[in-house]
Amino acid sequence: MTVRLAVEGLTIRLPKGADREYAIEDVSLSVAAGEILCVVGESGSGKSVTASAAMGLLAPGLSIASGAMALCGEDLRAKSPEEWRTIRGRRIAMVFQEPMTALNPLMTVGAQIGEMWRVHLGLDARETERRAIAALREVNLPDPEGALRAYPHELSGGQRQRVMIAMALALEPEVLICDEPTTALDVTTQAQVLALIKDLQKRHGTAVMFITHDFGVVAEIADRVAVMRLGHVVEQGTAKEVLTEPQHEYTRALLRAVPGLVAPEPRPLADDTVLEVRGLTKTYASRGVFRRRKAVKALDEVSVALKRGATLAIVGESGSGKSTLARCVVGLLGSDGGQIVIGGAPLPKQRRDAARLVQMVFQDPYASLNPRRRVGAQVAQGPIAAGTSAAQAAAETRELFCTVGLDPDAVDRYPHEFSGGQRQRIGIARALAMKPQVLVADEPVSALDVSVQAQVLALLRELQERLGLSILFITHDLRVAAQLCDEVAVMRNGVVEEAGRIGEVFAAPRSAYTRSLIEAIPGRALFGA
Amino acid sequence: MRVLRLALWRLAASLPTLLLILVGMFLLLQLAPGDTVDALMAQMGGGDARMAEEMRRFYGLDLGIAARLGQYLMRLVTLDLGFSAIYGKPVATVILERLPPTLLLMAASLSFAFFFGLLFGVVAARRVNKWPDTLISMLGLVFYATPSFWFGLMAIVLFSVYLQWLPAGGFGDITQNYTGFAAMLDIARHLVLPTLTLGLIFLAIYLRIMRASMLEVLSLDFVRTARAKGLSETRVVAKHVLRNAMLPMVTLIGLQAGTMLGGSVVVESVFALPGLGRLAYESVVQRDLNTLLGIVFVSALLVIAINFVVDILYARLDPRISAES
Amino acid sequence: MRALKAYFRSPAALVGSAILLAVVIMGVGASWFYPGDPLGLAGRPLQWPGANPRFPLGTDSSGRDIAAQLFHGARISLLIGFVATSISVVIGIAIGAVAGFYGGVTDTVLMRVTEAFQTLPNFLLLLVLVAVFGSTIETVTVAIGLVSWPPVARLTRAEFLSLRTREFVQACRVQGLGDVHLILREVLPNALPPVIVYASVVMAVAILLESALAFLQLSDPNVPSWGNLIGLGRNVLRTEWYVSAIPGVAILLTILGVSLVGQGLNDALNPRIASGR
Amino acid sequence: MNGPSRRETFLLGAAALIPASAVAQEAPRRGGVLTVHFSTEQRILNPSLQASTGVYIVGGKIQEALVDLDAEGRPAPALAESWESAPDGKTHVFRLRRGVTWHDGKPFTSADVQFTAMEMWKKILNYGTTMQHFLTEVQTPDPHTAIFKYERPMPQGLLLRGLPDLGYVSPKHIFETGDIRQNPANTAPIGTGPFKFVEYERGQHIIAERNPNYWRNGMPYLDRVVWRVVTDRAAAAAQMEAGQLLFSPYSALSIADMQRLGRDPRFESTTRGNEGNVRNNTLEFNFRNPVLADIRVRKAIAHAINVPFFIENFLGPFAKPGTGPIPSVSTDYYPGANMPQYGYDLALANRLLDEAGHRRGAGGVRFNLRLNPAPWGEDIQLWSTFIQQSLGQAGIRVEIVRLDAAGFLRSVYNDWNFDLATGWHQYRSDPAVSTTVWYRSGSPRGAPWTNQWGWQDERIDGIIDNAATEVDPVKRKALYADFVRAVQTELPLWMPIEQIFVSVFNRRIRNAGNNPRWASSTWHDTWLAS
């Protein structure tokens, strides 16, 4: 096998004033023809910077301090911008993470793909179109002719990523760099896209450098793996070696943090139901005299029940209605039909009354705290509004900070002084401060790095034990659900597909949809057990 | 068909706004000291009280406010803007006579500001933080800070008084009976300075917006995609960035149509252009209620029309919009 | 603190602050530099700058010292700028906040009103207001404030619309906090930075509007406003053009200063743009 | 081309009209377009309905009056060839010119005069309604005789001096149907004059062309007259210099430009030809303010203002100190300068104010006054600023209240909401037409340019009434001298500056300014040098 892309001792300097001097330091990697190299690491590990450097598209401010890059033996660092232009797209292509924003919204798909042949080969319109259709067909896009005339917003995320892949492979590049290409996709779509990449790579013999943070994905497609941490490659080897016999402690920790799909032993559950959702219906309809939009049923007669002291997972892909359900339960959204009963009584309309019954932990640790107010005040304000004296609320807040594993003195700091995991702990403290009967957690760990995710999950588990919390846990990640929850309800298009004890559902799914979800989990072969 | 429906919808949606403006303006003007007859007396240079009283009766100023407002709105339904006391003609005629210079001036200024704003904005963004950017941004700031009437006056001093290149004012040289192309050329010569004067601040605004918008778009993912495709910078900018970056500018045109119309009051006054802005000023001073309300009506329609055109333009530029409606 | 440091790193902000400071010093120190009535008869009218050492910037067509008017005018321009801006920002924020926060019918009604104000050319409305309520400096200032709030309202509304669905606002709702708390404590502080930046635009526009009014001889003749001076100078433009030119430069510099400060604020409060990429 | 003999006959006549003018030596050139500065847009152009210079500038070329003024300012025949009056002053007979036709071809007759006098002058025309208030009928014994009958004696001098401005005739056949005010001929006038109306583009221009059937044979010389609407003074001056305008009447340019263009050999800035249009800058006191009702305060104010300084430095050569409400150019009624006058004496002013009990308070201020200046005329603005500056020195703080025309008239003449006001008093040939109404009590509220000051003096009212109906010119003059002495003593208002309107001509215009109201006159003998 010939080495296509080789990176030797690459060091990239960050602009002045950054938190460290180098984005990556002494990184050496190589990808050979017909090989997939997975570069894996958590946020800030420098994996994306490495990819950009290999494309010659470093962000302004970043500069290569030392090291070498070669494409099939040609020194890439010596290339002029003009030469780089002929290499990019033609010999090294790239697929980016966000399919929603990576395509020009104002250009048809056909025009964007066609540019590849027009610019690099100077082909005419007809030939370009012929090739574009073929390329779209190759990435299994339904109705390739129609897709050519479509604008990106008319395609789904998975379809757009297919378009991106078709575009990247248009000129049969020697090297394909994929920067987290499936992170933004639903799990079933992700499985399809991964399969597609692997398949195409096999067929074309492309050398693929695949950037990801997800060991599941690594297990799914990698031939070789490089693990990065804070700008350094800490471990490199074949997929099998790294995944099964990790040498570096960091790799081991990361692998440990990947949740398994098998649920722990079921706990005995109380009979008492603390939250009952009965036939809840929510329709998003558009208003306006002339503009008609289709009404979307986000929730269609949804009924679920949460037992006291238990954790109920609501799982499903995007658009399944799980977040709508969560928002209805805490009263942020009104419903169009059905009932929400907490502790035997309907959810009160008054915000202040509902606050004592149900609280919520939000998804985004950065957006869920007001950046301009001290975190302690944000936790204490709920109890104060409910009538607790300021002094007592302050004392309780400090206690809560201890409970969630934060320094009680941190109450006087501002959100930006905390890491993502710490902020999520503050979010949990804020919810607990109201001493609610039900805690709704809406994807509380999905925005976190895997190691932090494990810590937060551990905290939730501990709190659940200690405080006997009843939790409605919304997630798209079945493995996370399996680790934490007692029961599960699988949702799809606003309907509950199936529900039950989580171990039973995951071990023997009754619904085909549940089964497809489980099958789509990347790295199931490795981490399933 | 869809465009027509959109137009009707626009108009229907702006009817309450229009009504609000007209009624508000009508009531506001009732509070003004003095009425049309006072202004007429001033124009005549004298007259006695009996005459004034008769004139008030003649112009219907002896009726109550509610009655007059009712009358006005009733007439408006039949698209009758009424009769101008000061000009002695139907308001519609007066306004129609004054509309062309203003429309020409606005169109010229808008084109000037848009074209050069676009050009300078792109150049500045392409050379961000280098000397062309610094120079252009500086110029933009200075243009923005220049009071338009003052610029007009100084331009007159320089170009009309000292250099004698361009006429100091007016809409055309009527002593020469120009026709056809010569007449157009003559009007164009008269419009050079007013266009610059009115367009300057908008040039500055567009330039700034275009630069910021370019920088914004240049940082977007799809530009990275385009670069990763190996496109030349020129092609990246021309094919991918420009159209996206123009969207905020197009929006701005609609938002600032009213401001521009307001600016033409001053510019027309500086250059003695017989336009709508000047007419507005005169009818405020003359308390010519009908004419003023007519102008308000027409300029509101104009703003609505411009916004409508901008909407269509926007929809043409951005397929996401057309898909939505 | 962080923002302040970022602010003073921007050269635009430094230059702008320096210009504004100079104008402020002119305005505040006007009575000290030029005691006595700046509108009083100082000497023979229309003396060119430099022609008479007593009047370094010459005299206007009413025989008043242009330098004295320039200094006292700084005070007027800044006063009008600040007061009119405050009025329009307060109105704009109030309307924008309520409309953006509550949405629905409230939003529709308020936005119709805003739209009405925006559809009507603001200078036209200003003319009418001044014609109706007179042209004392107070009414002119209030009128300018009254015609320049709609963009502030729109901006505030847009910020509120995007902020009210943010998770931290929802978290407060879930905590049972009232709307007043949500608007004033949670959303407003976060919506404010762009509005503050925009206030510099409003201030520039306010100064320009007053000078345009004065130019049309519709502003208060009892105050030494720069616009008044330009308007007076118009009568002698062809020969004694300096009467108009000098205050025009003063307006230009002041607005330049305000804009630069605004840009500096923007750079400081909106770090995403600041890096320049 | 016309025969030389005919031209020579004209030249003799023209030479008689123009005293001491070298211009008259040249032979008039036919043709050419005279472009005229038109600074205030007019609602109507019919001088039978509206008496104002803005209308005369245009309408005066298209329509004609019964009587005109000759070069010396004496009444001269126009549409009326001759006139005689009964001794009691109640009957005035006008013999009308024969062979005159309207622009639409219809003959001009006494019926037109009768109709215009009764329906327009007496009912609608400003100032006309005052002058013709006691006109009872106009008899028309034949098509060329009009006999005016008055209820009270009408001095012939008053009538003849009034008619050049207030005696324009309109065609009866055009106006007799429908509402006179709404008649389209008001904006597209039809007359008997040397020029025929062509078009009026609002905001742009008015065009009139030569009337080939004009009754003065061979006239006019000009092909066209074009009035360009230029509201901006500076722009107008620029167009004068560029040759786009040839004539700017009635002080429509800025004072600076009028002086500047006067120094340019291409132009002439002059008061010549405007002797019939004199104005005073006024200072009006509101007697409802007790401070101003005190004559010591009024006198102090007058003494505190250095009028000669103001004229010298601000108005230049076109103005002179006024000596009273009847200006010095009014040869028939000017009583001379030996009337009570108020020279600049700041010390005296301060003393008078002290005496009146107005001691200086904080900041040296005795009391505050609001001053409403009329919004027309650059000189009014300068004058009001100068008043503010001057009174400030006497310890009176003046706040200028800036209002537009409608607001000014309403607040001063209707709402009486002012302390001081200043504007123009325009003298129109006879004090009874334009001047005494400023002083006569009993004017209904809301009538502009009348006594709305709250001032009342029965003796002066008596003089005014007697003078208006006094038929004997000598007695009349004496009565007006009494009037001036009285009002200069009591000072209900002050007219300290006398200004003749200024015309700026391009020197290509010949026979310019050859009568006292030239800008308003017919221009039948005006021609353009090449």
Image (cartoon, rainbow, N blue to C red):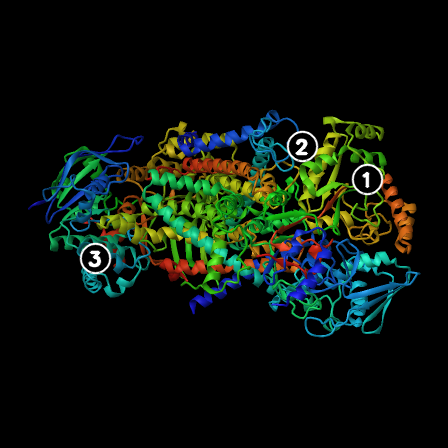
Check the residue under mark 3 and report the chain it is in. Answer: A
Residue located farthest toward the left when viewing the structure as drawn: A1
Q: Label 3, secondary structure: give it.
A: helix
Q: Quadrant of the N terminus of chain B?
A: bottom left
**Eye-nearest disc, 3 or 2:** 2
What amino acid type is highlighted by mark number 3? Arg
Disc 3 to disc 2, C-alpha distance:
76 Å
Check the residue under mark 1 and report the chain it is in. Answer: D
**Mark 3 lies on residue:** A118
Residue visible at 93% across and 61% down in the picture: D88
**Eye-nearest disc, 1 or 2:** 2
Discs 1 and 2 lie in a common subunit: no
**Quadrant of the rendered image containing residue D228:** bottom right
Could you say where residue D365 lies in the image, as x and y percent from the top left? 74, 29
Residue visible at 20% across and 37% down in the picture: A228
Discs 3 and 1 lie in a common subunit: no
Specify whether residue A405 is in view: yes
Could you say where residue D100 lies in the image, as x and y percent from the top left? 73, 71
> Can you say whether A43 is above or below D10 in the image?
above
**Mark 2 lies on residue:** C41
The crowding category of the residue bearing disc 2, from other C-alpha atoms within 10 Å (few below 14, some 14 to 19, many at least 20), is many
What amino acid type is highlighted by mark number 2? Leu
Q: Label 2, secondary structure: give it.
A: loop
User: Horizontal placement of A435 versus A193: left or right?
Assistant: right
Disc 3 to disc 1, C-alpha distance:
88 Å
> Can you say whether C73 is above or below A328 in the image?
above
**Mark 1 lies on residue:** D289
Residue visible at 66% across and 41% down in the picture: C136
User: Horizontal placement of D518 versus A521: left or right?
Assistant: right
**Quadrant of the rendered image containing residue A196:** bottom left
Nearest to the observer: residue D199 or residue A36: D199
Could you say where residue D20 lies in the image, as x and y percent from the top left? 71, 50
